Image: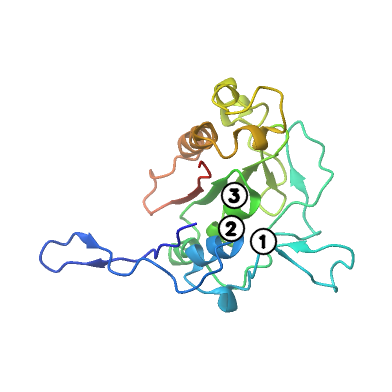
Amino acid sequence: MPISKAAASASSSTREPISKDCYYDYANTKTAPGHATLGTGAYTDGHGISSNAWWDLTRNKTRPVTSVEDDRYRIVARFIPATSPGPPPSNLRASTVGDSLRLATQGQAKLFGISLKDRASILPAGYSANGAYWIEPSSGAFITSSYYMEALPGLGDRLQFRRPCRASRAGSRQPRGIGTFYESVGSTPAGNAYELDFARALITNEQLGSHPVTDMLTLSLSAQ
């Protein structure tokens, strides 16, 4: 995945942003380290996310732990049983741009992350996010973690917490009913459209951009 610097220099004459150096100097382009770098501006040795998963025998001796794994929290979902831990940003060792925004505004700014995958919504947003949302792979319903909230907002189908929209499945490259929602739709333009629909609804319901201070929403899109 391309790794772009968040900051860009500005021309003193035109005041237009001019990007002169758009790449971080590392070859590890796995999802979690890349998103952590984009969010924090730090490399792996600074933000602590070395891969999507790694072995930590103090936490689990039978399998690797994921980059956003923490057994203290649970999945928060509307119609899906909360049977698995709910990912938080506990493994992240550096603050993000969004964290700095929240600190600078004394918590007045709203900060959210959205993606089809948990790590891609959680890591770019950071520790102090008001919420991070991703999909349950089988159904396509958006879910979150008890790290952020104890229950989903009472907004019903408007925020697609129940069932995936038919248009997304119709736009899939695979026959309907083959594989999970993510396998069928996740890497297609329909997956992007599904995620962007959710983002628009979240912006409206949280009134992002209508406050006296700056709000922030991070998005990760996966279409090929």
Along the viewing direction, whichever of 39 and 127 lies nearer the viewer: 39
Confirm or deny contact between disc 3 and disc 2 (CB under 8 A).
Answer: no
- Pinpoint residue 74: horizontal percent, then vertical percent: 78, 50
Residue corresponding to mark 1: 52
**What's the residue type where badge 2 is placed?**
Thr
**What's the residue type where badge 1 is placed?**
Asn
Give the number of the mark in front: 3 or 1. 1
Tell me if 1 is positioned left or right of 6 in this view: right
* Dot placed on the residue nearer the N-terminal end, 2 or 1: 2
Q: Is residue 119 above or below residue 56?
A: above
Residue corresponding to mark 2: 31
Element type where label 1 sits in the image: loop
**What's the residue type where badge 3 is placed?**
Gly
Binning the other alpha carbons within 10 Å of mark 2 as few (below 14), some (14 to 19) or many (20 upward) gives some
* Dot placed on the residue nearer the N-terminal end, 3 or 1: 1
Is residue 189 visible to the viewer in this orientation of the structure?
yes
Q: Which mark, by number, is residue 112?
A: none
Element type where label 2 sits in the image: helix
**How far apart in space, not on screen, are marks 3 and 2 (Cα)?**
20 Å
Element type where label 3 sits in the image: strand
Along the viewing direction, whichever of 68 and 52 lies nearer the viewer: 52
Residue at 68% from the left image edge and 67% from the top image edge: 91
**How far apart in space, not on screen, are marks 3 and 1 (Cα)?**
21 Å
Would you identify the image quadrant in which residue 36 lies? bottom right
Q: Is residue 222 above or below residue 50?
A: above
Q: Is residue 209 above or below residue 175?
A: below
- Pinpoint residue 112: horizontal percent, then vertical percent: 53, 50
Confirm or deny contact between disc 2 and disc 1 (CB under 8 A).
Answer: yes
Residue corresponding to mark 3: 131
Q: How is the image coloured?
A: rainbow
Residue at 72% from the left image edge and 46% from the top image edge: 150
**How far apart in space, not on screen, are marks 2 and 1 (Cα)?**
7 Å
